[in-house]
Image (cartoon, rainbow, N blue to C red):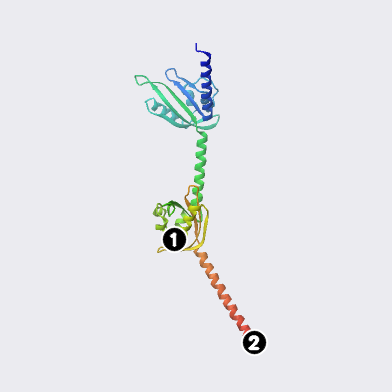
Amino acid sequence: MPEKPYYEELLQQQMILSKAQDIAHIGSWDLDIENNVLIWSDENYKIFGIPKGKKLAYEDFLNYVHPEDREYVHSKWKEALSQKIYDIEHRLLVEGRVKWVREKAELRFNENGECTGATGFTHDITEQKLSEKALRANEDRFRALFENMYDGVAIYRHEDEGDDFVFININKSGQTLSKVKKFQIIGKPITKVFPGVKEMGMLESLRKVYRTGRTEKLPMRLYKDERITQWVDNTIFRLPSKEIVAVYRDESERYIADEKVKMMNKELEKRVEQRTRQLQNINEE
């Protein structure tokens, strides 16, 4: 009989292993195929929502797999019996609640190539899957907002240590306002696509925002090249990833309208001045 300290050490190791499995949400299991006996760790019982110590067989495990995943899991297990890798993700249905798990196992084979058993782990990845789902939902919301904004939005990555900037995305409004197609400009420097950005002051603003991280606004600037002429309003900011975003709109119509109002005001002032002089001349007579 082993000495008492050995039992104590073994018990302590088992307690540490059990605690580690609880913290990591990873259970372990062993399947004796010849006797169809499935042995689970405490954490594995917890993951599946089964009372600890309940006797189990492979069929019992399969019954806890989500009905829509059951055929997939069973087919992967049959493949593993032919010495293929068993490393899968699937759902469980535990007391009406869906859980996601990753399962991986190493199978044991005899000299005839027959599987005699397997040892593996079950990792509860439900939180990870929920986080991925939430992230996808956020990405979908961002994509919908990005593509349906009234303003044009262009995203750039810096090149040559922030000396030039390359298009990595542009929304639908941006393509319409700038009279370009996305596939034509992605991966190209802004100085090649819009050679007038330096003259209008935007290139320097992009560089400044990249260096300082402070948002820069360029109200009503004239952009002009051989292809287009526009009065554009830009707001430029830097993302945590150091990508640069420009939100802009074509203000050409507003500029023309403002110029007309200015001309009308000047004309009105001129007429008022002329009328005032006429009245003064009359009074002097």
- Mark 2 or mark 1, which is nearer the start of the sequence? 1
Find disc 1 in the rendering and name its residue. Answer: 198
Residue 35 in the figure: left or right of residue 11: left
Three-letter residue code for mark 2: Glu
Residue in the picture at 57% in, 77% down = 270
Q: Position of residue 152 (x, y in %)?
A: 48, 56
- Mark 1 lies on a secondary structure that is helix
Most foreground residue, 271 or 209: 209
Q: Position of residue 134 (x, y in %)?
A: 52, 41
Residue in the picture at 65% in, 86% down = 283
Q: Position of residue 17 (x, y in %)?
A: 51, 24
Residue in the picture at 52% in, 37% down = 130
- Mark 2 lies on a secondary structure that is helix
Distance CA(mark 1)–CA(mark 2): 58 Å
Three-letter residue code for mark 1: Lys
Q: Residues within 10 Å of mark 2 (few under 14, many from 20)?
A: few
In the current view of this chain or complex, which residue is farthest to the top? Answer: 1
Residue 112 in the figure: left or right of residue 264: left
In this orientation, does residue 185 appear?
yes
Q: Quadrant of the C terminus?
A: bottom right
Find disc 2 in the rendering and name its residue. Answer: 284
In this orientation, does residue 48 appear?
no
Residue in the picture at 60% in, 82% down = 277
Residue 279 in the figure: left or right of residue 64: right
Check the image and report above or below for 230 versus 68: below
Counting the numbered discs, the total is 2
